[in-house]
Amino acid sequence: MNNKDLRKYSKIVVDGVEQAPSRSMLRAVGFEDSDFSKPQIGICSTWSMVTPCNMHIDKLAEHVNKGTDEAGGKGIIYNAITISDGISMGTEGMKYSLVSREVIADSVETVSGCMGHDAIIAIGGCDKNMPGLMMGLSRLNRPSLFVYGGTIQPGPNHTNIISVFEAVGGHAAGNVSDIELKQIEDTAIPGPGSCGGMYTANTMASAIEALGMSLPNSSAQDAISKEKIGDCINSGEAIMHLIQNDIKPSDIMTRGAFDNAIKVTIALGGSTNAVLHLLAMAHTMGVELELDDFTRIGKQVPMLADLKPSGKYLMSELIKIGGIQPLMKTMLEVGILDGSCLTVTGKTLEENLATVAPYPTEQDIIRPFDNPIKKDSHLVVLRGNLAPTGSVAKITGKEGLSFTGNARVFESEEGCLKGILDGTVVKDDVLVIRYEGPKGAPGMREMLSPTSAIMGKGLGEDVALITDGRFSGGSHGFVVGHVTPEAFDGGPIAIVKNGDRISIDAESNTISLEVSDDEIKIRLKSWQKPDPRYTRGVLAKYAATVTSASEGAVTDKYI
């Protein structure tokens, strides 16, 4: 394959007399004569100082660029946006979080599509970066790979961002003093990197590695480490190999690969957001994946990782014992993973795992298959008269497998948080937060503030929470999100009244409003759709195009 064949897209932009203006502009940003004959590699950096998750990614992008240039390509760094869930949590700003996933996907498609990049390396850190970048890579379907920005180190006393959220609840309960709260606030986030538990960022990084779209171990490296620098530099050689062999995301992101990603997510006890994002990524790639596939797959895979939020350990501790590679090798050996799936190394998953050593015998972060934390998936899809088209619960078994209680209804996250902190919420309540779905919020906010307040007030075993919004990967307790149809679309969650009995059963996979069918029909008939909360701008555009959470909350399915 000659060099011209490696420049399938860039040659249109820079070759020929008529493209002299294009070359002239590129010379201004550092191109020399020899660079015009090289494959152009778009390096999408999500660097930003709005969050510690991404504050170091500018440096990582430089290492990626170095590796790309040394491998014979011409790296071109550009930026996509990022927002911070942790900073915006519990505020109106959080409505932009899931929206940012679509904006990031649009950015990758727009920039690399416009500029004729022959391949793309995308570097992500915070939660929505990763699926957004992957969706952008899938849309273009050019040789591509993903680099994870890496995880943060823990703060003193094994603290992290969830420690701060839960300390707020503890402070309201009188168990955490002003001084203690200030100390946790000051020290829990010591520097760069994504939130330290098996929250959404580390979940999605692990899922993408299992999917085959990042280099081995990319998901299990500290943000500030020589290993992460090596991961960045090695991406340059890998991307050139992908170009030379014309290996595209569609060759890697197959249905078998998505099944692998789901299975690894389950074994790790990953975030409920993985359901939403994997559905969206599959849609973008043209792979058939449905909500019920998570139920089917979930029956085959145990939860093995004792990681926060429901467990004891942080990602930095999993890294020290080998990351997720030994887990995947064991899963492959027992027949759970499909080892034939192609990866960005140009090798199959089985070939990548061939030389991986097992975990140290004394570790207890990853349980053996004969002693799992839960014998099947913690990601439970629930249906019933309260969620006819599905909902997603994160139930590890530690919070029990069923809950029945009295509805206490809130029309927004803010109202619920206030009710928890001021003592309105009591034992045996099922908290119902509605009009927080993709269309109704709009934006499907994460309910980390209420769930953390519940745990901080010591109500984790005494109340349940359901919502048409979603949860942070840091949420734990008896919580059910992604209730569909959402309230704004007239789903049954819209007509729940205070005092109604609600039953949630993770063994029968049901969620039920204990009200007669006739009464439900009467209430639905009298329900009136509220006016949209936004009529202009990005939130209005999002609400007008977004699908149900059960379809991944994507914005390009029905246009």
Image: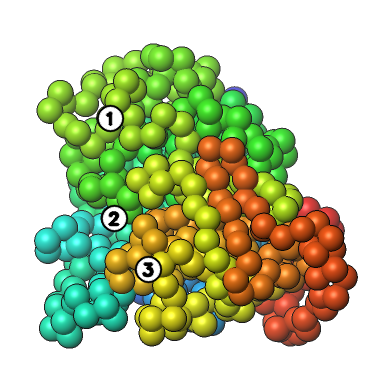
- Disc 1 marks which amino acid? Arg
Question: Which one is in front in this view, the residue at disc 2 or the one at disc 1?
Answer: 1
Name the mark nearer the viewer: 1 or 3.
3
Residue on which disc 3 sits: 454
Local SS, label 2: loop
Q: Nearer the viewer, residue 411 or 238?
A: 411
Mark 3 vs 2, N-terminal side: 2
**Label 1: which residue?**
367
Residue 359 can be seen, yes or no: yes
Residue 557 x, y percent position in the rendering = 78, 53
Q: Which comes before the other along the chain, label 1 or label 3?
A: 1
Q: CA distance from mark 3 to mark 2?
A: 21 Å
Camera-side mark, 3 or 2 = 3
Find numbered disc 3 in the image and state the secondary structure of the residue it sits on.
helix
Pointer 3: residues within 10 angstroms few (<14), some, or many (20+)? many
Residue in view at x 33 percent, y 50 percent: 310
Within the image, what quadrant is residue 460 found in? bottom left
Q: Residues within 10 Å of mark 2 (few under 14, many from 20)?
A: many
CB atoms of marks 3 and 2 within 8 Å: no
The amino acid pointed to by label 3 is: Ile
> Is 276 or 280 nearer to us in this picture?
276
